[in-house]
Amino acid sequence: MQLDRFGVIEGVHFVLSPNADARPVGMPIELIVIHNISLPAGHFGGTGIEALFLNRLDGAQHPFYAPISPMRVSSHFLIRRTGELQQWVACLERAWHAGVSEWRGRQRCNDFSIGIELEGTDTLPYEPAQYQCLRALVRALKAAYPIVDIQGHSDIAPRRKTDPGPAFDWFRLRGL
């Protein structure tokens, strides 16, 4: 995987989410945050995630969508169950993925992190193709940016979030 000068993986499916803005000037990218997402919960392969990241999620389409359809969120990357990599925000921009968060005493993790969503849930095992893609992506990101740590969303927002959950195999990722 190769990143261009804006932080876009060359050749990847890239759709620009409106839910991003500029990082603070001079802010290095030091953290990767691993998340999970499925819309509706536990259903894979649909268009719900794309609709959410593009502010097009119809709250009337499914009961699960109603409370989250007004949210304005994004992530830099999404890795589908098939291992397909999608990008929603260039790495040099700030994606809105971490919310209220803290890492090593620093607030606002969106300022200095890259968010990677895995299509999944806290409790269902992730697919081998997802780990393979994730490892390649992490290697590319570490080669491009001064990343010093990888954390789960639950680690930077412990009272608020649980993802990527107990089904995520950290040993499988850390085998980089």
Image (tube, rainbow, N blue to C red):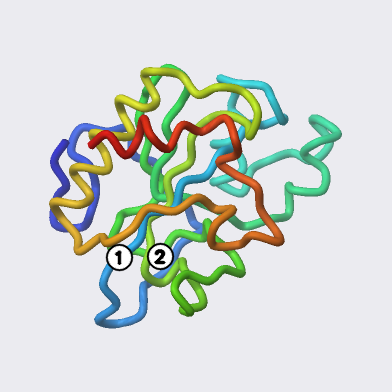
Q: Residues within 10 Å of mark 2 (few under 14, many from 20)?
A: many
Residue 82: image x %, image y %? Answer: 42, 17
Type of the residue with mark 1: Glu
Q: Would residue 118 be found to the left or right of residue 62 on screen?
A: left
- Residue 99 placement: quadrant: bottom right
The residue closer to the viewer here, 148 or 6, is: 148
Residue 42: image x %, image y %? Answer: 69, 25
Q: Is residue 139 above or below residue 46?
A: below
> In the image, which is nearer the foreground, mark 1 or mark 2?
1
Q: Residue furthest front?
A: 171
Q: Would you name the residue on which mark 2 appears?
A: 94
Image quadrant for the N terminus? top left
- Residue 92 placement: quadrant: bottom left
Q: Residue at x 13, y 51 (%)?
A: 143
Q: Residue at x 23, y 54 (%)?
A: 7
The residue closer to the viewer here, 7 or 118, is: 118
Q: Is residue 149 above or below residue 2?
A: below
Type of the residue with mark 2: Arg
**For numbered disc 1, what is the local secondary structure?**
loop
Q: How many numbered discs, if any? A: 2
Q: Residue at x 30, y 25 (%)?
A: 132
**For numbered disc 2, what is the local secondary structure?**
strand
